[in-house]
């Protein structure tokens, strides 16, 4: 962003500033490399362990296969949103920066984790003597650790001052009135280090020695040092090999296979290469004809008496070499006058030969450009089509840079050099053979020597000088031509072709090596032409009816087993449950419980290893992916927006009117002018706060990936798009994690009203988000722990969900909402 006016005084030299963005920036490396990330401190184990504990990462590292040596893929693709946020926070905390800028790192975590971060990270010893600028919606939670508070609304500062000063002016109460109550229940244990609220209960598991471990241990006394714990953390016991995510790039050995050459020729077109080969033969034939013609033209000046005599002598020479040609068979030469008397007929014939050669060369060049363009376009389209249909697992284990290299460097090589190298090699080989035939035709006794010298040129090209061997070829050819007593014109032709023979031998060796090098790019592209594909987009014999999914049969999951690859363990372990039509179901669970995997299974992003999912009476594994994914709407935590207008993002296929677009924008609080009933309802609840309209026109532009919007606004646009589609089945995966709590409540109310007839499955770590849903599904380690209505689950004091709610900061609000 550019500074338009004013000044910002901030010393950014020598790593004095650390920044943690709301959308976590992570590189493809291990978790340890992302946290240390070139810090001038290097890897300090004591500081590193303290940072891991302060950022509540210990339990996550225990779950991961190789602890902190686990690779997290491009942009941290293998981590959840909360884990990505805490790894990015840990990097800022580990750095020696004196100023730390934090853009709402608490948005992606639940209240328990947020309290832990505020207590042990923001207020811990690692933040001592540092300036921290924190942007957050959790005002009351962070207030005890803050010295100065600034409230911004509509891009302007409304209130600012120290906490004591705001209290004295009576403005602090007004600021806190916009924040959802987050008081700590007495039964809550502040020492827990948990990923989400479900960890309060589900995080308790027996360790191999039989003891019970809840969350991540933190010292009860802040004066305790790391050295007092002699036991090595469990997440340090794994090897880096166990956490390897990205596959090594395949490396072919030996020579380029014939299949690679066939792939390129097939992409260019068999006919184009066949025509190119014929044109090469024609060009070489015209050149040889031209040489013979010029030799006879030159001899005509030495014997001006009778051109017919020259032609007879020429053909007689050819007859002695094995031909059986008479002058009558070439009548054009009988009437040619001596060139010193009338050279025009000779020039005309030479012009016609040259004109034929020029048009042949022009056709050859044009065909070469066409074949090169056709091959590049065909390979590009085929590779793009294959990668577009590749499963998501391929992109998890393949770096984006490697894919871009195929489309940039390798396609560039195919565009520029492959065709020229292949044609040069073919042309060199043709010149070699044709010149050898001409020499042997004129001087048959030279054949064995020519083959021997050619073998020397090809086999020992690094030991012998090309110019030396070329001179030997020309010298020996001249001797053999003179000893054979051929005419002077034929001798000139033989000597000229001996030079072509020597040069062609060198060219074949040099160009063939270049061809092998250039065709490596075709081989690398061919590797991506064999990428494993997803299921077909459309299966004509198994297309669902136009009204599918309807509100008739609901959803049934039967013995669902899912894993991400053949070598990875199962993530979902035999899930079985049913969802009634139009039911709203909330899904909660700890990190690694399988919530996001369940969402992915509904879209067949990950195929089920066993079991099935029935949606409105149809097994989704039997229909095409396009039919499935266009009928089910998913709103993920990582929102996908495209560069273009607001309307093109809401309605990319132009299926809805402008009024409908504006309606969903208003209901998602992205535009003003709420209806009177909605305004009165919000005022009655005391939750209405005037919000600035994000969009004023549907043609307003959104930048690439929604960079012009905040994370919360991007999620609201995605929700508006989902509401506009009005699908009968809607899945949301932490779709409101970056939205403030007040707006989240309003959005959930809108979902219940606007999608009243739809079946909604919501994955959330905020219990307030799903407490008013019809039923709650609690997952742990890929299995169903509980599945019932919130009221029934709360009536069971020993139940997992009941304990989860009693340990929540919003316990009183949860009880009230369930009663209502």
Image (cartoon, rainbow, N blue to C red):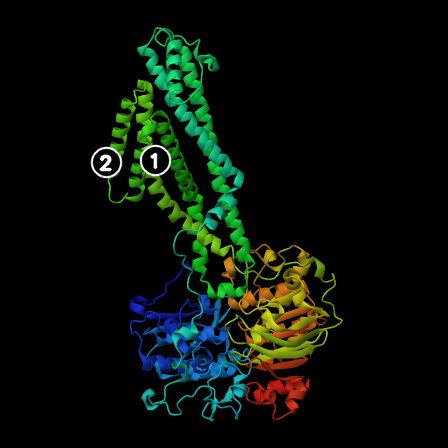
Taking the spot 39% from the left edge, 16% from the top edge, the residue there is: 316
In the rendered structure, find residue 468 and report the number of the disc placed on it. Answer: 2
Report the side of 73 relative to 388 (left or right): left
Name the residue at 49% across, 63% down: 395
Quadrant of the drawing holding the C terminus: bottom right
Q: Nearer the viewer, residue 709 or 360?
A: 360
- Secondary element at image label 1: helix
Q: Is residue 583 above or below residue 807?
A: above
Q: Is residue 673 visible?
A: no
- Residue 194 position, x and y percent, is 48, 83
Q: Residue lying farthest right? A: 552
Q: Residues within 10 Å of mark 2 (few under 14, many from 20)?
A: few
Give the class, few, some or many, for how many residues have Cα within 10 Å of label 1's Cα (few <14, many ≥20).
Answer: many
Question: In which quadrant is the N terminus drawn?
Answer: bottom left
Residue 97 drawn above or below residue 654: below
Residue of label 1: 504
Q: Position of residue 710 (x, y in %)?
A: 51, 66
User: Please, is residue 734 above or below residue 536 in the view?
Assistant: below
Question: Label 2's element?
Answer: helix
The x and y percentages for residue 812 are: 60, 88
Q: CA distance from mark 2 to mark 1?
A: 15 Å
N-terminal of the pair, mark 2 or mark 1, is 2
Q: Quadrant of residue 51?
A: bottom left
Disc 2 to disc 1: CB gap under 8 Å: no
Tell me where residue 507 appears, x and y as whole percent.
Answer: 34, 38
Q: Nearer the viewer, residue 472 or 546?
A: 472
Q: Is residue 623 visible?
A: yes
Question: Mark number for residue 136?
Answer: none
Q: Is residue 468 above or below residue 535?
A: above
């Amino acid at each position: 962003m550019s500074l338009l006016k004013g000044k910002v005084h901030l010393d950014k030299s020598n790593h004095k500033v650390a920044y943690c963005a709301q959308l976590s920036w992570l590189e493809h490396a291990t978790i340890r490399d992302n946290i240390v990330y070139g810090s001038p401190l290097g890897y300090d184990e004591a500081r590193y362990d303290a940072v891991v504990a302060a950022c509540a990462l210990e339990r996550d590292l225990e779950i991961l296969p190789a602890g902190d040596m686990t690779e997290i893929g491009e942009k941290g693709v293998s981590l959840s949103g909360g884990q990505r946020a805490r790894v990015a926070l840990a990097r800022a905390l580990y750095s020696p920066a004196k100023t730390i800028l934090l853009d709402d790192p608490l948005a992606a975590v639940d209240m328990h984790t947020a309290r832990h971060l505020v207590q042990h990270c923001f207020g811990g010893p690692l933040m001592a003597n540092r300036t921290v600028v924190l942007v957050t919606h959790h005002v009351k939670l962070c207030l005890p650790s803050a010295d100065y508070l600034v409230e911004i609304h509509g891009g302007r500062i409304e209130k600012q001052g120290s906490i004591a000063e705001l209290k004295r002016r009576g403005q602090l109460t007004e600021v806190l009135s916009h924040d959802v109550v987050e008081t700590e229940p007495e039964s809550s244990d502040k020492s827990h280090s948990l990923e989400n609220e479900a960890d309060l209960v589900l995080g308790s598991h027996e360790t191999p020695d039989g003891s019970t471990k809840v969350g991540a241990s933190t010292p009860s006394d802040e004066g305790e040092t790391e050295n007092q714990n002699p036991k090595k953390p469990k997440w340090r016991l794994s090897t880096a090999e166990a956490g390897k995510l990205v596959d090594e790039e395949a490396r072919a050995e030996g020579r380029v296979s014939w299949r690679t050459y066939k792939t390129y020729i097939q992409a260019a077109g068999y006919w184009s290469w066949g025509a190119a080969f014929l044109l090469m033969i024609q060009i070489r034939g015209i050149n040889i004809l031209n040489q013979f013609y010029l030799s006879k033209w030159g001899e005509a000046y030495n014997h001006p008496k009778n051109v017919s005599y020259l032609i007879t002598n020429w053909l007689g020479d050819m007859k002695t070499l094995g031909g059986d040609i008479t002058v009558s068979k070439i009548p054009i030469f009988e009437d040619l006058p001596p060139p010193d008397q009338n050279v025009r007929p000779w020039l005309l014939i030479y012009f016609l030969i040259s004109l034929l050669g020029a048009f042949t060369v022009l056709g050859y060049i044009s065909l070469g450009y066409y074949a090169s363009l056709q091959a590049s376009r065909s390979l590009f389209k085929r590779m793009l089509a294959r990668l577009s249909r590749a499963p998501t697992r391929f992109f998890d284990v393949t770096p984006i840079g490697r894919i871009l290299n195929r489309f940039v460097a390798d396609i560039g090589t195919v565009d520029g050099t492959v065709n020229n190298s292949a044609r040069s090699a073919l042309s060199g080989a043709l010149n070699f053979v044709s010149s050898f035939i001409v020499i042997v035709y004129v001087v048959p006794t030279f054949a064995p020597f020519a083959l021997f010298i050619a073998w020397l040129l090809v086999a020992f090209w690094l030991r012998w000088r090309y110019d030396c061997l070329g001179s030997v070829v020309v010298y020996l050819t001249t001797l053999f031509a003179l000893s054979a007593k051929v005419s002077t014109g034929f001798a000139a032709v033989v000597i000229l072709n001996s030079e072509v023979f020597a040069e062609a031998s060198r060219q074949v060796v040099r160009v063939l090596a270049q061809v092998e090098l250039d065709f490596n790019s075709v081989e690398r592209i061919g590797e991506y032409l064999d990428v494993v594909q997803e299921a077909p987009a459309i299966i004509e014999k198994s297309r669902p009816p136009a009204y599918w999914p309807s509100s008739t049969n609901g959803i049934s999951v039967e013995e669902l087993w899912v894993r991400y690859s053949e070598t990875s363990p199962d993530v979902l372990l035999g899930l079985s449950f049913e969802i009634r039509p139009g039911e709203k179901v909330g899904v909660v669970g700890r990190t690694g419980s399988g919530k996001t995997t369940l969402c992915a299974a509904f879209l067949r992003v990950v195929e089920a290893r066993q079991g099935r999912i029935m949606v409105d009476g149809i097994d989704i594994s039997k229909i095409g992916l396009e039919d499935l994914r266009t009928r089910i709407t998913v709103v993920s935590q990582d929102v996908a927006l495209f560069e273009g207008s607001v309307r093109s993002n809401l309605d990319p296929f132009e299926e809805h009117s402008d009024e409908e677009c504006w309606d969903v924008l208003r209901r998602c609080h992205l535009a003003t002018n709420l209806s009177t009933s909605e305004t009165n309802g919000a005022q009655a609840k005391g939750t209405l706060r005037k919000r600035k309209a994000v969009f004023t026109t549907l043609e307003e532009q959104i930048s690439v990936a929604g960079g012009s919007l905040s994370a919360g606004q991007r999620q609201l646009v995605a929700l508006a798009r989902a509401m506009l589609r009005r699908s009968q089945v809607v899945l949301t995966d932490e779709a409101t994690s970056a939205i403030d709590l007040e707006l989240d409540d309003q959005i959930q109310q809108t979902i219940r009203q606007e999608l009243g007839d739809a079946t909604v499955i919501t994955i959330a770590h905020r219990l307030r988000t799903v407490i008013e849903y019809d039923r709650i599904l609690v997952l742990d380690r890929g299995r169903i722990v509980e599945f019932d209505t919130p009221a029934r689950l709360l009536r069971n004091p020993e139940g997992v969900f009941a304990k989860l709610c009693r340990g929540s900061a919003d316990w009183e609000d949860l009880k009230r909402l369930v009663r209502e």
